[in-house]
Amino acid sequence: MSNTHICPTCDEEITLPEGTVAAELITCDECETMLEVVGGPDGLTLTEAPEVEEDWGE
Amino acid sequence: MMRLGLFHSTIRAEEKLLISSAKELGVEVKLYDIRKINLDPESFVVDFDVALERSVSTTKGRHLVRFLEGLDVPVLNSSSVATICEDKFLTAMVLHKANLRQPKFAMVFDEQHAKEVINDWGGYPVVTKPTIGSWGRLISKINDDDALEAIIDHKMVLGSPEQKAFFIQEFIEKPGRDIRAFVVGGKVIAAIYRDSTHWITNTARGGQASNCPLTDELQEICQRSSEAVGGGILAMDLFESPQGLMINEINHTMEFRNSEKPTGVSISSEIINYCIESQNVKN
Ligand SMILES: Nc1ncnc2c1ncn2[C@@H]1O[C@H](COP(=O)(O)OP(=O)(O)OP(=O)(O)O)[C@@H](O)[C@H]1O
Ligand SMILES: [Zn+2]
């Protein structure tokens, strides 16, 4: 399985570091969009991270 | 080998630190994405010894903890601790009952009564904040009657019923910083100063973190506050006021990514160790 992905926002190549898990948040170095790593049957993919909601926080 | 159920939504720097500390301490971590599991008591399979709730959404975290407690699974933090810490007015009342120093506060339901309270306190400035909320959102510093009227008027017209309850605090003049203390199992493990030129000093809003020494005064107020809310894994925000340290609020799913480096304390390891201890107590 390749750990190279394409940013869904700017199409830049993103290499996921070793040990990346599903649901992890990463930031695209190119466009600085916050992305979520999504786990699926075919391995990991990237989508835009969810918008902050009112009940988020500590 | 102990199995830790780590219940998360998006995995942030904190969860990554917890996962790697657990590995180092020989704890097996089972990851559960709260957004992807069914809280159905008939079908849910418990294959961990202790659960740690790390949801970024307070609502989802609350339901999860109540679910696991109903299945008789040990979970941190408990729902009783979360219920208190989630609500700033309830926290303030619990701290009041325990006789702890905190900013003057009151709950009022309209402008006239807000003015009465502020008058009793000797005038402006005051702070209003939602009783439920975080990251400094919708917190306002109010300097005069005009600003008070504008804020209350907006909430009366546009707000939800929850927003028509006004939690007011006296404004505390801080020395350009406040203190965040990490308290795990009643023990103060580390603290940072959060410096900022803005009166809202949250690191989430750009405050700078540096190490804060664990003085006797800090330890005492934190230990007593921890006891008052029921213990667990807590982050406390304190102000250095002219009268001494004051406790402002207590968070029950704390963020600590910016605090391990300045303090030199592995907050994540302390949390994992506490999970191990809690499991031993329950067995
Ligand atoms: N009464 C007050 N007097 C002076 N400053 C205050 C007062 N209340 C809050 N602040 C400032 O605003 C910041 C945020 O307030 P508070 O911690 O109550 O809100 P929050 O949204 O729950 O933030 P957190 O992310 O820390 O949970 C505090 O760290 C402090 O710097
Ligand atoms: Zn991008």
Image (cartoon, helix red, strand yellow):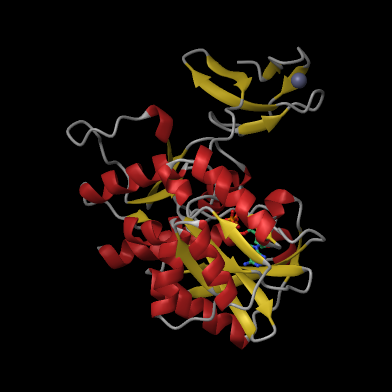
Horizontal side of A58 relative to A46 (left or right) equals: left
- Say which residue appears at 55% left-offset and 77% top-offset: B120
Instruction: Identify the image quadrant of residue B243.
Output: bottom right
Residue situated furthest left in the rendering: B42
Please give the name of the residue rendered at 21% of the width and 31% of the height, measured from the top-left corner: B43
Which image quarter holds the C terminus of chain B?
bottom left
Q: How many marks?
A: 0
Q: Position of residue B237 (x, y in %)?
A: 60, 67
> Ligand 2 falls in which quarter?
top right
| Res B236 quadrant in image | bottom right
Q: Foreground: B97 or B140?
A: B140
Q: Is residue B102 left or right of residue A2?
A: left
Where B270 sits versus A5, above or below?
below
Q: Nearer the viewer, residue B219 or B266?
A: B219
| Relative height, residue B139 to residue A35 (above, below) | below
Q: Position of residue B21 (x, y in %)?
A: 56, 53
Q: Which residue lies at the image location 46% right of the left edge and 80% below the top edge?
A: B224
Of the pair B90 and B23, the residue shown nearer to us: B90
Quadrant in which residue A27 is drawn:
top right
| A39 shown above or below B81 | above
At x 66% / y 52%, what residue is drawn? B257
Asked whether residue A8 is in view, the answer is: yes
Q: Could you tell me residue B190's position as x and y percent?
A: 62, 70
- Image vertical order of residue B235 relative to residue A32, above or below: below
Give the left or right position of residue B73, taking residue B84 as reference. left
Query: Looking at this rendering, what residue extends furthest in the front direction?
Result: B112
- Is residue A55 visible in the rendered image? The answer is no
The x and y percentages for residue B117 are 53, 71
